[in-house]
């Protein structure tokens, strides 16, 4: 079916540049009546319906009138094994890990269990319009296999890796520096660049890795230069203090990773709430990325991410949005953008509707170094996209009533309403490689 050439007609919105640095006119592309032509799961042509249709008069076309079509959402930081422990009450990071997270992750030594949760997790991503994610698994290699096998069956572009942790966690959840090196190496050879899958070397965070384990993670990164590095960084002040005690020879938290050779272009650091100016500068120099996880930062009481500093013109750092489920409280990138806006408000800053939607799409693709193959509707990219319906709840319908927006100003207002009020109910279709893979079942 992927070989069929086909068209999608509707109102399309994507980004050609970063709206934090460019005006909406120069960064936003909006085609109120557009045609997306898909061939073998990739974008063959994209433009105004009237201009493009004659050339493709023979192809089947699916129309989505009065809806908004955008690239699929990209979640730059999420934990699939924590799906079942979302919304665990009452603790900040370190207590939350001991009380809820570690006991849950122990269950993933059972491959069958891991498979079951992986399927449920991917269903949930697609239901929320997320088409690509950077994903934590657990310390157990079989939990990595379960995830990649499920993602491969669904043709998804996913990045994941085995958690490396060799201290300060329950013994049954710990590997050793050497075993984590060997198991990670075998998993990279098995999964990295297999179809749409990519591997991320995944030390949990500096607290749960010895110096030796971080060094071996750096060795792996040298041996496999196009794999990713995925970890946590400066999320919580008690965590930052403990890291300083554990690594007295390092100049701060980021330096624990830097000294092991882990700070580079394909490195993604979740949180970065308590980074120093020098650390922001170092991340910018290395072209590394931060996953901003506002629902998690608020839920765990971690703090307010300095998005304005990350997006400074002097030392710009790549930023994507992460849900960080299970510390994050929603799978929805719409709701995550909503909370990102409120974090900016609490810092006396602002976040425009286009900036927020950019973070959830092209910005996420750039943070994950995937913008050459997805993230907007450029010809040649993967046809992973979603259809947003503003008529699916009474309040959204009331707030956004009527025709597709006529200009960028009206569009910004419409997008803002979707971000503030929308969630999984606003997703009326999710397409992967041009195939419809999720649509809500019709109400009775
Ligand atoms: N830091 C180390 N592990 C974790 C985790 O599982 N979740 C979050 N939010 N932070 C972490
Ligand atoms: Zn996390």
Image (cartoon, grey):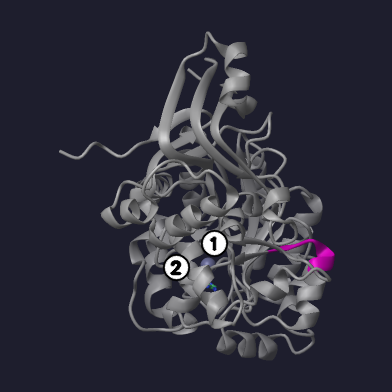
**Residue for point 66% across, 33% down:** 381
The residue at 84%/71% (across/down) is 314
Res 165 → quadrant: bottom right
Q: Residue 322 got which mark?
A: 1
Residue closest to the eye, 387 or 195:
387
Residue 339, given in percent of the width and then of the height, sits at 48, 69
In screen coordinates, is 148 left or right of 320?
left
Q: Which of 27 and 249 is in front in this view?
A: 27
Residue 86 coordinates in the image, percent (x, y): 36, 66
Classify 10 Å Cα crowding around label 1: few (below 14), some (14-19), many (20 and above). many
Could you tell me if the residues under marks 1 and 2 are in contact, i.e. CB atoms within 8 Å? yes
Instruction: Mark 2 and ligand 1: say if the CB distance to the nearest ligand atom is below 8 Å.
Output: yes
Closest to the observer, 75 or 20: 20
Is label 2 in a helix, a strand or a loop?
loop
Question: Does 180 appear above or below 9?
Answer: below
Is residue 115 depicted above or below 64 in this figure?
below
Residue 421 drawn in magenta:
no
Where residue 209 sits, quadrant-wise, is bottom right
Q: Residue furthest top?
A: 58
The quarter holding residue 280 reads: bottom right
Query: Is residue 187 shown left or right of residue 69?
Result: right
Residue 257, percent from left and from top? 74, 72
Q: Distance between the residues labelled 1 and 2?
A: 8 Å
Residue 328 disc label: 2
Residue 434 at x, y percent in the picture = 51, 28
Q: Is 328 placed above or below 50 here? A: below
Residue positioned 47% across, 15% down in the render? 60
Q: Residue at x 81, y 72 (%)?
A: 282
Return the residue nearer the eye: 384 or 255. Answer: 384
Give the secondary structure at mark 1.
loop
Asked whether mark 1 lies closer than 8 Å to ligand 2, one says: yes
- Magenta part of the chain: 284-289
């Amino acid at each position: 079916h992927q070989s069929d050439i086909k068209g999608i007609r509707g109102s399309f919105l994507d980004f050609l540049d970063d709206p934090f640095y460019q005006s909406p006119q120069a960064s936003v592309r909006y085609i109120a009546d557009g045609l997306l032509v898909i061939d073998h799961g990739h974008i063959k042509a994209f433009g105004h319906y009237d201009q493009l249709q004659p050339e493709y008069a023979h192809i089947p076309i699916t129309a989505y009138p009065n809806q908004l079509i955008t690239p699929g959402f990209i979640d730059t930081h999420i934990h699939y094994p924590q799906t079942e422990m979302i919304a665990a009450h009452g603790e900040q990071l370190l207590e939350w890990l001991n009380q809820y997270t570690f006991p849950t992750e122990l269950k993933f030594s059972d491959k069958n269990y891991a498979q079951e949760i992986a399927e449920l997790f991917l269903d949930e991503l697609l239901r929320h319009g997320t088409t690509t994610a950077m994903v934590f698994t657990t310390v157990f290699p079989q939990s990595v296999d379960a995830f990649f096998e499920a993602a491969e069956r669904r043709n998804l572009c996913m990045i994941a890796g085995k958690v490396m942790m060799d201290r300060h966690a329950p013994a049954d959840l710990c590997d050793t520096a050497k075993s984590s090196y060997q198991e990670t190496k075998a998993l990279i050879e098995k999964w990295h660049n297999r179809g749409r899958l990519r591997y991320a070397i995944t030390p949990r965070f500096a607290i749960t890795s010895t110096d030796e384990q971080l060094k071996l993670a750096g060795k792996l990164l040298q041996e496999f230069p196009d794999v990713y590095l995925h970890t946590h960084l400066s999320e919580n002040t008690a965590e930052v203090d403990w890291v300083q005690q554990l690594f007295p020879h390092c100049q701060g938290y980021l330096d624990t990773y830097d000294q092991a050779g882990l700070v580079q272009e394909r490195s993604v650091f979740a949180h970065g709430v308590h980074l120093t100016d020098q650390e922001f500068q170092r991340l910018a120099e290395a072209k590394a990325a931060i996953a901003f996880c506002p629902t998690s930062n608020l839920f765990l009481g971690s703090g307010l991410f300095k998005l304005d500093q990350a997006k400074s013109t002097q030392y710009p750092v790549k930023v994507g949005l992460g849900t960080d489920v299970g510390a994050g409280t929603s799978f929805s990138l719409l709701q995550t953008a909503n909370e990102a806006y409120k974090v900016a408000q609490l810092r006396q800053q602002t976040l425009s509707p286009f900036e927020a939607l950019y973070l959830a799409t092209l910005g996420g693709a750039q943070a994950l170094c995937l913008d050459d193959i997805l993230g907007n509707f450029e010809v040649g990219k993967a046809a992973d996209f979603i259809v947003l319906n503003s008529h699916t709840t009474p309040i959204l319908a009331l707030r956004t009533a009527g025709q597709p927006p006529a200009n960028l100003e009206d569009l910004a207002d419409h997008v803002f309403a979707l971000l503030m009020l929308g969630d999984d109910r606003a997703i009326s279709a999710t397409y992967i490689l041009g195939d419809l893979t999720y649509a809500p079942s019709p109400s009775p």
